[in-house]
Image (tube, rainbow, N blue to C red):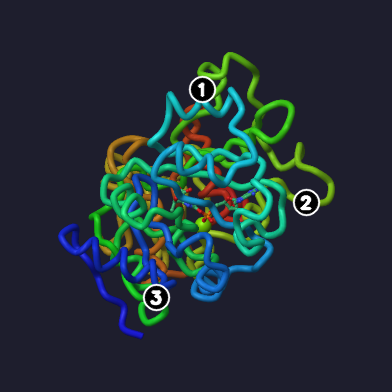
């Protein structure tokens, strides 16, 4: 299959392909998603196959607006309305009980809940509005690889496996959406993202828990995807929590470093061994996955040292993704 890349003037071609049950990747403000019409079981199964994703890891349902969501949710509680009012369209995924029989079980992995997301991206909004059906939207990467923040990343992973990619340029945030579960008594953040638990708690006017992995149910992990290996480049990743420790690393030609520009310039390594995360945490969020992919393509790099951040709730999302990429390894010396 030849994978076509569409620009914004060719949106109708992407709509036609989706309507026929083909797979088309699309931009969002967080990362690129892999779309298929959510009501078409065969198309949805194709998404698992293209990504190499385990079938018990349910998919996000991407909607154009709240009205579209209402057709697939059992009910939309007051809490959800508050969050939608404040944060949609935007990088917040909301877990609600599913309307029975409205979506194929392949979407929900057999769970009673569905994850709804309404991205802040005009192209994708228009795509779904024209299609008149929601599309599933897992990140458009090969399973275990870093999520794609450009159309080129998607092409790298999925060329020949999907019909098309809508190219909306690099994504703004760079890390996936915050996921909040509203199907439980006390709302709980299952995956941190740009929107922090504090912001959610303020909008709701009530306590919001954070899933540290310990709060989860004994049997089913609350966000099934979180149990899988993720974001991992081929070379092992080590987190450097204290910027002063970059001076203690033993640098060789086989070492890669990802850090803020101010730190990189003090490190004596060839430019190709360095990846600049930018000037601050917001830019580091934006660049993290791109950097992990950069080193993944370099066979000579055997170890990657990546700067950690400790900036309260605003660094939760970055550290969550980085910890997964590093399998929990921190620099110690
Ligand atoms: O920013 C995002 O959310 C991106 C863009 C493309 O929208 N999408 C994304 O999808 O990150 P994905 O599939 O890579 O991650 C979704 C996570 C997975 O960990 C999955 O297990 C969890 O959401 N999830 C989906 N449905 C769920 C459900 N019903 N209950 C619990 N977790 C669910
Ligand atoms: Mg993903």
- Residue 276 visible, this orientation: no
Residue drawn at 52 percent across, 67 percent down: 40
| Closer to the camera in the image, 285 or 130 | 130
* Residue depth check, mark 2 versus mark 3: number of the one nearer the observer: 3
Residue 261, horizontal then vertical, whole percent: 27, 43
Crowdedness near tag 1: few (<14), some (14–19) or many (≥20) residues, C-alpha within 10 Å: some
Q: Which residue is mark 2?
A: 220
**Label disc, if present, on residue 82 of the rendered structure:** 1
**Label disc, if present, on residue 162 of the rendered structure:** 3
Q: CA distance from mark 2 to mark 1?
A: 28 Å
* Residue depth check, mark 1 versus mark 3: number of the one nearer the observer: 1
| Closer to the camera in the image, 333 or 30 | 30
Crowdedness near tag 3: few (<14), some (14–19) or many (≥20) residues, C-alpha within 10 Å: many
Assign a secondary structure to mark 3: loop
Residue drawn at 45 percent across, 36 percent down: 66
**Are circles 2 and 3 on residues that touch, CB within 8 Å?**
no
């Amino acid at each position: 299959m030849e994978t076509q890349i569409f620009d914004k003037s060719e949106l109708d071609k992407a709509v036609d392909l989706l309507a026929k049950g083909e797979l088309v990747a699309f931009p969002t403000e967080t990362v690129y998603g892999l779309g298929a019409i959510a009501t078409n079981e065969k198309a949805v199964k194709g998404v698992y196959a293209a990504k190499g994703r385990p079938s018990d890891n349910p998919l996000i349902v991407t909607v154009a607006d709240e009205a579209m969501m209402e057709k697939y949710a059992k009910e939309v509680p007051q809490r959800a309305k508050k969050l939608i009012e404040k944060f949609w369209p935007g990088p917040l995924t909301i877990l609600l009980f599913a309307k029975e029989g409205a979506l194929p079980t392949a979407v929900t992995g057999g769970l009673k809940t569905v994850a709804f997301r309404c991205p802040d991206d005009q192209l994708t909004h228009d795509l779904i509005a024209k299609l008149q059906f929601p599309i599933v939207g897992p990140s458009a990467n090969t399973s275990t690889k870093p999520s794609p923040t450009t159309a080129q990343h998607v092409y790298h992973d999925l060329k020949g496996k999907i019909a098309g990619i809508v190219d909306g340029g690099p994504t703004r945030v760079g890390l996936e959406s915050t996921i909040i579960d509203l199907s439980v008594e006390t709302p709980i953040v299952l995956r941190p993202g740009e929107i922090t638990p504090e912001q959610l708690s303020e909008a709701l006017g009530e306590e919001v828990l954070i899933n540290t992995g310990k709060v989860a149910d004994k049997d089913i992990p609350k966000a099934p995807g979180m149990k899988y290996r993720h974001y991992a480049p081929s070379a092992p990743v080590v987190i450097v929590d204290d910027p002063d420790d970059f001076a203690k690393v033993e640098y060789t030609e086989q070492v890669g470093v990802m850090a803020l520009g101010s730190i990189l310039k003090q490190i004596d390594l060839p430019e190709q061994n360095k990846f600049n995360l930018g000037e601050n945490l917001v830019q580091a969020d934006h660049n993290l996955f791109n950097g992990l992919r950069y080193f993944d393509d370099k066979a000579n790099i055997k170890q990657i040292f990546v700067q950690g951040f400790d900036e309260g709730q605003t660094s939760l999302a970055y550290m969550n993704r980085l910890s997964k990429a590093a399998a929990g390894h921190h620099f110690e010396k």
